[in-house]
Amino acid sequence: MSQAFDSGLYVGTVVHERKRPRTNRFRYGIYFIYADLDELDALDASLRLFSLNRPNIFSLRFEDHGPRDGSPLRPWIDGVLARAGIDLEGGAVRLLTFPRVLGFKFFPVAFWYCFHADGTPRGVLAEVNNTFGDHHNYLLHASGGVFDWHTVPEARKVFHVSPFIEMDARYEFRFSEPGERVSVSLFDYVSGPLLLVAAISLARRPLTDRELLKAVARYGPISLRAWLLIHYQAIRLFFFKRIAYVPRTPPPEEETSW
């Protein structure tokens, strides 16, 4: 595929480390597609194994993201940004997410990287899902100004994710600029002290049929793999680590917080 595309494939690892009341740490291989919203039709036309809004080995569907009603994603994210006082003036929006693999849909989190027309970053939207079928978005930004990759944006936890972590929590995020490598770290402070650190560290590959096949051959269907591993870790926490179960809290009425 032409190198003119800004979309790509990121391959690497995810690490979770729980600090208390008992430690639990795991590390798994992982891969994401990094899809420029303006290139989705071209990607669909260029790749045999990836499709937009139709079945294939790998696919991305509008109904899985944003408004989740099958409508195009760009008007939705522009509207979300506008409500926070952010105008990209036509700049790029790139979505880092698990694709559907063999039709299976699940991703714990996807990140929308939002750039102004002048190329400067203006925010990152973290689109979070839980295994109960709920979702919520955290928009991290600088009130319309340039988003500095060195800052540590924070968010109050308003959405139930893990049944082993309470809601009285705040998040700290650390992002690197997407390039040959990209990383995201989340620090979860619960009732004061740090409870959990989660991080992804990824290296860029070209988004080609060959690279997609290599990724799935090494790590399997990533959406299904993640769903199974999350439930496996839940079993470990409950039965072996004796971590207390936290009942589900319904998601907030407002789908996006900032």
Image (cartoon, rainbow, N blue to C red):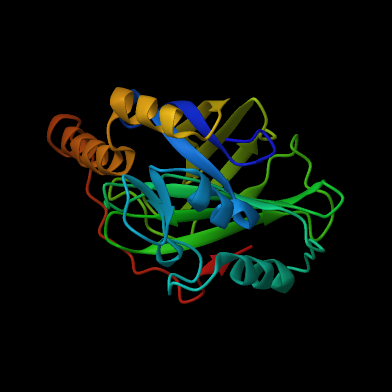
- In this rendered view, identify the residue nearer to me: 4 or 91: 4
- In this rendered view, identify the residue nearer to me: 113 or 161: 113
Residue furthest right as drawn = 118
Q: Quadrant of the N terminus?
A: top right
Please say if 136 is above or below 246.
below
Q: Is residue 196 visible?
A: no
- Number of marks present in the image shown: 0
Is 57 displayed left or right of 188 in the figure? left
Residue 41 percent across, percent down from the top left: 55, 57
Q: Quadrant of the C terminus?
A: bottom right
Residue 232 percent across, percent down from the top left: 19, 36
Please say if 249 is above or below 19.
below
Q: Is residue 190 visible?
A: yes
The image quadrant that residue 233 belongs to is top left
Is 240 displayed left or right of 75 in the figure? left
Residue 146 percent across, percent down from the top left: 83, 49
Is 118 displayed left or right of 22 in the figure? right
- In this rendered view, identify the residue nearer to me: 174 or 170: 174
Please say if 196 is above or below 56.
above
The image quadrant that residue 203 belongs to is top right
Residue 144 percent across, percent down from the top left: 81, 60
- In this rendered view, identify the residue nearer to me: 155 or 243: 155
Residue occupying the point 20% across, 30% down: 241
